[in-house]
Amino acid sequence: MYDDLFIGMTIYHKTGKTQAIITEIDHNNINIELSKEIACKKMLTLPITHFGEWIFFKEDDVELSSEILANKSEYLKYNNRKIIDAYRNNIEQKKKIEAEEKRKALELAKQQEIELQRQRKLEEELKLEIQSKENFVNMLKVNYQFEGFHHYTDFLNFLDIMKTGKLLSRNEAQKCGFIDAAEQSVIDRTSEKVKEYVRFYYKEKTPTIYDNEGIKVDNSLPHMPIPVLLLFNENIINHRNIAFTSGCGGSKYSQIKNNFQTAMNFDWKTVFNRGWIPSDEDSIMTLGYDSNKANVINKRNAEFLFNKEIDIKHIKKIIFRSPADKKHAILAFGEYELFEVDASKFNNHRNYLYDYDIVNNKDRYYISLIFHSGKRKYTHELKITYKDGFSETVDVIVPNKRIINKPITNSNSFYFDFIPVVDRIVNRIEYFMNGHLCALWEG
């Protein structure tokens, strides 16, 4: 007898989920009384093996498949053929699933081991590469006094770089607007690949910087009126997406290599060499130009390339050529430990404002302008902005009622007093040399 069946127990017939009461039970059959007729009958005698196929313990079980009922022990014990077959099929499926899960687990473990080995290999290669680059940098330091990667930019660009916190490649900078100090003919023949990189020199005072640096009398292009040197840490060489050029990145004679080992064989002695380059008169007579000199100039313009953009946190020094430029930077950003003045990092072959002083002395301003060399051929103007919004521009050279006591104590300096408009309060005084802002005072 089945211990989970008893007379008076409520079960359900499949047809219409009809409720029924057990009226009699023996080992092989079960008698039930239906709550409503099925095929004109209310009393049925059914084989006990009909549990799970025609009769069920719960109303909701009627809708369940044989596969689900086979997982219920209360149905399995009545030996319904469909339930038994489903049970066996479930076991087979379970075995298959377990086998597949085991296979997948083994495959995953294998893949994880392969990936782990790959990662270990990459880490070892990276360690070796970093060590090789460190040895390379140390070689440059010992043999050529390498200090870091040099990026020259105009002061106006420098202001934007500091505000955004990023130094951008040419292609990225063009999206934002910038002061372009490059020779257009060189840029026209420079590949798009190179333009995707931020470009650095290995040493100061390259031939390109010589051509561009300083305020030109005619403001002709290419032009970097007020140069600033951003000296970046040598550790940026460990970035993955970098490249090395054997000469100017815009020259067809330069190699551009992503492979560090290949770049190690560049002519670094010439890259770091500075000073006068002897001319080959025979070559000039034969070719019309000195091919050897052109080759040396190209190599001195060799570049280190860093993809797309670089954070200013990698800057180790911000170098100005004069106290005047540093004062301007301090007014913009406050005192900054990376700021320093070192004129030796620049060519200084064009005139510029070396230092200045603007002092408010009640009803007048004492102004001193000290230049690197003579003041000839340049324009010199003051722009005074008052707190009420009124502004005026005054020529320092041409006699003017605003400027008095203008003795020139030497050829490199201006010392004079400036008298503002009566009853107006000065908010800002700017000094422009050839139209370029070189000195600033704010009230």
Image (tube, grey):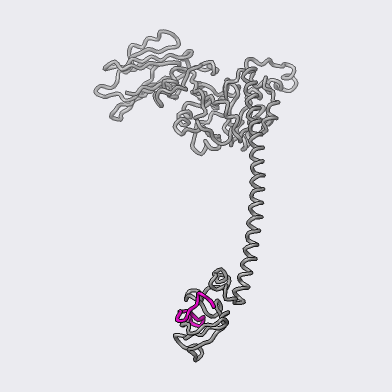
Question: Farthest front residue?
Answer: 1
Rendering quarter of residue 49: bottom right
Pick the quarter of the image with the C terminus: top left
269 or 94: nearer the viewer: 94
Q: Is residue 136 left or right of residue 173?
A: right
Hey, which quadrant is residue 69 in on the image? Answer: bottom right
**Which residue is at a point 57% across and 82% down the rendered structure image?**
28
- Seen from the viewer's position, the closer of residues 114 and 36 is 36
| Visible residue check, residue 253 | no
Compared to 4, does 231 lie above or below?
above
* Residue at 26% across, 24% down: 424
Q: Is 353 placed above or below 65 here?
A: above
- Residue 39, horizontal then vertical, whole percent: 51, 90
Q: Let me know if residue 6 is in the magenta part.
A: yes
Quarter of the picture containing the N terminus is bottom right
Does the magenta run of residues contain 320? no
Q: Position of residue 47 (x, y in %)?
A: 57, 83
Q: How many marks?
A: 0
* Region rendered in magenta: 1-17
Residue drawn at x 48%, y 74% is 60
Splitting the image into 4 quarters, where does residue 440 fall?
top left
Point 65% across, 58% down: residue: 100
Give the x, y percent position of residue 336.
43, 23
Q: Position of residue 43 (x, y in %)?
A: 49, 88
Q: Is residue 383 above or below residue 119?
A: above
Q: Is residue 54 left or right of residue 443?
A: right
Q: Is residue 326 visible?
A: yes
Instruction: From the viewer's side, name the closer residue of 280 and 71.
Output: 71
Q: Residue furthest left?
A: 423
Tell which residue pokes out farthest to the bottom in this image: 40
